[in-house]
Image: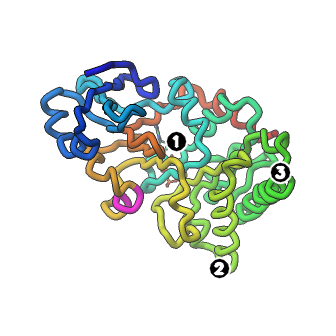
Amino acid sequence: MRSVRGDKTKLYGLIWGIDNKGVTVSAFEDKTEQLETALNFRIDRIELCKKSTCTRLYVTPRKHDRPTIISPYNEFFAKELSKLPNLLCVGKTGSGKSYALSVLLGIYAKYIPTVSITICDYKKSSFAQFEDTSNFYGYEDVPNGIRAFYQEFSERLAANDEERNKQIRVLLIDEYGALISAQDKKAADELKTMVGNMLFMGRSLNMRILIGVQRADVEHFKAGARDQFRAILALGDLSKEQRQMLFSDYKDKMNERNGLGEGYMLIDGKGIERVKIAPIRDFEVLNDTIRKAMCR
Ligand SMILES: Nc1ncnc2c1ncn2[C@@H]1O[C@H](COP(=O)(O)OP(=O)(O)OP(=O)(O)O)[C@@H](O)[C@H]1O
Ligand SMILES: [Mg+2]
């Protein structure tokens, strides 16, 4: 072993640097289970260091093998999350998606000082407390919210104005699947095209999208758009099909049973992580921060 250091993105994670003596990453991966048993660690990820003679193992000691907490107060992870360009949150009804999305919006509002948040809540339930702000769109008004956000996206795309692009804008669409299913073909197509374009090109324009769905369905996205999500948060236990569709490389690691607000988060380039959404300490504070960001 060459080095051990703490993994700042996790509560108890460690990063081991190992002199690999020419053993490939896939050979390490093939032995994951044996290594985990022998060393009493969970291995989260294995990658080659810049120097190809060194391999990095991201591990968590079994005694700390607990989910990473998602909360505005778990500062390091929250800051990581606030950098994500887009995120898909998926889970059966009652798994805690809308609650998790509120926490994520709270994180954006807390860690991105000038962020502007737009909420499209198709069920007009979980976010209805923001109904009095101009950036809230509920039920039949949701397509207008997406259009308004898309307008800014198109203008940014045309203007190429660095100053304008600096302000991060976040669009939440909760119950996206139900929204698309309820539209006729033409309207559904219009919405899917807008969302698809923003997923493809929104990143450099600082136009971000958060989507909540009960089931990720290829029908609900333009071809390829689903693969644009840089992060996927799955709450509760996903069906086998959903695991295969969304987490194909990691589905064998998703062995834990997940209660309310628990699940897995896959971040591009960072691998999969077991997560738990912390109970909200103070709804008033959270709602207040989100509301301020909705008035920008
Ligand atoms: N992490 C959590 N801690 C404590 N309570 C939670 C947590 N997540 C969700 N809840 C509670 O569980 C219930 C269901 O959560 P939520 O409405 O977020 O589920 P959902 O996945 O959005 O469901 P639906 O698909 O029906 O909208 C709510 O009453 C919510 O307050
Ligand atoms: Mg919900």
Q: Which mark is residue 166?
A: none
Q: Which mark is residue 100?
A: 1
Residue type marked 2: Asp
Quadrant into which the C terminus falls: top right
Q: Main secondary structure of the magenta part?
A: helix
Element carrying mark 3: loop
Judge depth for marks 1 and 3 and give the one in front: 3
Which residue has dot 3 on it?
A: 160
Q: Is mark 2 within 8 Å of ligand 1?
A: no
In space, the residues marked 1 and 2 are separated at their CA atoms by 30 Å
**Nearest the eye: 132 or 28:** 28
- Residue 245, position in %: x, y? 39, 62
Q: Is residue 82 left or right of residue 143?
A: left
Element carrying mark 2: loop
First-in-chain label (3 vs 2): 3
Residue lying at 55% horizontally and 30% vertically, measured from the top left: 78
Which residue has dot 2 on it?
A: 184
* Residue 244 visible, this angle: yes
Q: Is mark 1 within 8 Å of ligand 1?
A: yes
Residue lying at 51% horizontally and 24% vertically, measured from the top left: 74
First-in-chain label (1 vs 2): 1
Residue lying at 78% horizontally and 39% vertically, measured from the top left: 166
